[in-house]
Image: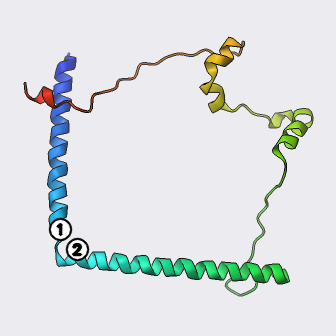
Amino acid sequence: MTTLREALRELAKARAAEERSKKILRDAEATLVLTPEAMRVAEVRESLRVQQDTLKVADSAVRETALEMFRATGDKKPDEHVSIILKRHPVYDAGEALEWARTRAPFLLTLDVKAFERQAEEYADKGAPVHVEFDPEVRLSAHLGDLLLGA
């Protein structure tokens, strides 16, 4: 069986190897940025960004114009390439709906699990059918370099 100290030493070695690889990658990327090919890719990316901004503006203008036409005429097909759909959107007061559901549709009322679990201790003290258990979780130090000195 491996001791905790041996396992920590292996973890420290693996972290150190990862950091060395990350540095090699950063250095390679820094060198790559200076090549003509990388500069061309950067130019194309900037051109694409400008084109995408132009596309967003044009798309927004079409949508706004189509909605204005629909509001003015009620026409759901203002152009062969454009259609208007009506999305269902219930409008209600949450408090009134809750009161209504309590007496007429109690099956709609559900437990807010996250809120219940956050305050489980408090609810348990008030007789709720809940108790809290604690599971161990391992947290490791981010700095294990001193373990490499003895390796």
Name the disc covering residue 38, or none. Answer: 2
Measuring 38% from the left and 81% from the top, which residue is drawn there? 47
Residue, far left: 150
- Residue 133 x, y percent position in the rendering: 53, 15
Tell me the quarter of the picture where residue 42 sits.
bottom left
Q: Position of residue 142 (x, y in %)?
A: 26, 33
| Residue 14 in the figure: left or right of residue 135 | left
Point out the image quarter for the C terminus.
Answer: top left
Structural crowding at the residue carrying mark 2, measured as other residues with C-alpha within 10 Å and reported as few (<14), some (14–19) or many (≥20):
some
Query: In the picture, which quadrant includes the N terminus?
Result: top left
> Which of the 4 quarters of the picture holds residue 102?
top right
Q: Secondary structure at mark 2?
A: helix
Question: Quick check: 107 left or right of 141?
Answer: right
**Do the residues bearing badges 2 and 1 touch, measured as CB atoms within 8 Å?**
yes
Toward which corner of the image does residue 38 lie, by quadrant? bottom left
Count residues near mark 1 (Cα–Cα under 10 Å), then give few for <14, some for 14-19, many for 20+: few
Q: Is residue 3 above or below residue 49?
A: above
Spot occupied by residue 89 in the image (x, y as percentages of width and height): 79, 59
